[in-house]
Structures are given as C-alpha cells and as structure tokens.
Image: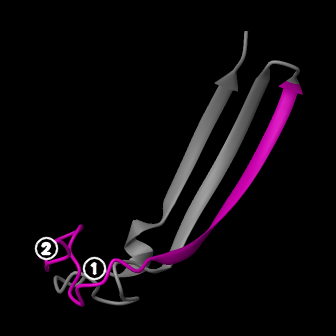
Amino acid sequence: MLFAPAPVTGSGSGSPDSRGGIGEFEVNPWQNIRFGLQYVAYNRFNGASNNYDAAGRNASDNNTLFLFMWLAF
C-alpha cells in the first residue's frame, strides 16, 4: 500500500489528501536581484489534521519557512 502508516511520510487513513496555503513576500532591490520569504502552512496532510501517520505527527508539524535569493544575469 502506497500510503501505509509510517513516521513522517505515512498516512494512517490511506489517503494522499493534503491541504494548506502558501504566503510569499518578495523584494526586488535591483532589477536583477530578488529576495523572498515563503511560508507553507498545512491544515491537512496525507488525509488528516491530527495524527496523520499513526505515529503522533500533526499536519502543522510540516509547516515550512523558506528564505531565498534569486539572481539573473
């Protein structure tokens, strides 16, 4: 079974359903440089909000903050 219970990547319900949102802030101080900050927030991950992997992990445990710099030349 592809979505079997397993720590971090598993699914206790057998469902791949994930839901959440992405917020991003960007600044272009010069024409060829961009700095950004992105936040990904999950309210459902692999089929559940709480204890999605049958090992006690919640969907919000996968929230991610990402800082980046983009350069074009």
Residue drawn at point x = 16 percent, y = 82 percent: 55
The quadrant where residue 27 appears: top right
Q: Is residue 1 above or below residue 54?
A: above
How many other residues sit within 10 Å of disc 2, few (<14), some (14-19) or many (≥20)?
A: few
Q: Position of residue 15 (x, y in %)?
A: 30, 84
Q: Which circle, 2 or 1, is nearer the viewer?
A: 2
Residue most extreme to the front = 1
Using the numbered discs, state the Cα–Cα distance from disc 2 to disc 1 in whole angstroms. Answer: 10 Å
> Which residue is under mark 1?
57
Answer above or below: position of 35 versus 32.
below
Instruction: Let me know if residue 18 is in the magenta part.
Output: yes
Q: Is residue 47 left or right of residue 6?
A: right
Magenta range is 1-29
> Left or right of 53: which side holds 33?
right
Tally of marks: 2
Indicate how the structure is coloured in the image. one colour
Which quadrant of the structure image shows residue 36?
Answer: top right
Q: In what quadrant of the picture does the C terminus appear?
A: top right
Q: Amino acid at mark 1?
A: Arg
Q: Nearer the viewer, residue 56 or 42?
A: 42
- Relative to 29, say whether 20 is above or below: below
Magenta-span inclusion, residue 46: no
Can you tell which quarter of the image residue 49 is in?
A: bottom left
Residue kind at label 2, given as amino acid type? Ala
Any mark on residue 23, and which? none
Residue 56 horizontal/vertical position (percent) = 22, 84
User: At 76% from the left edge and 30% from the top edge, which residue is drawn?
Assistant: 34
Please report the residue visible at 54 percent of the width from the left and 54 percent of the height from the top.
65
Residue holding disc 2: 6
Quadrant where the N terminus is found in the figure: bottom left
Left or right of 18 in this view: 25: right
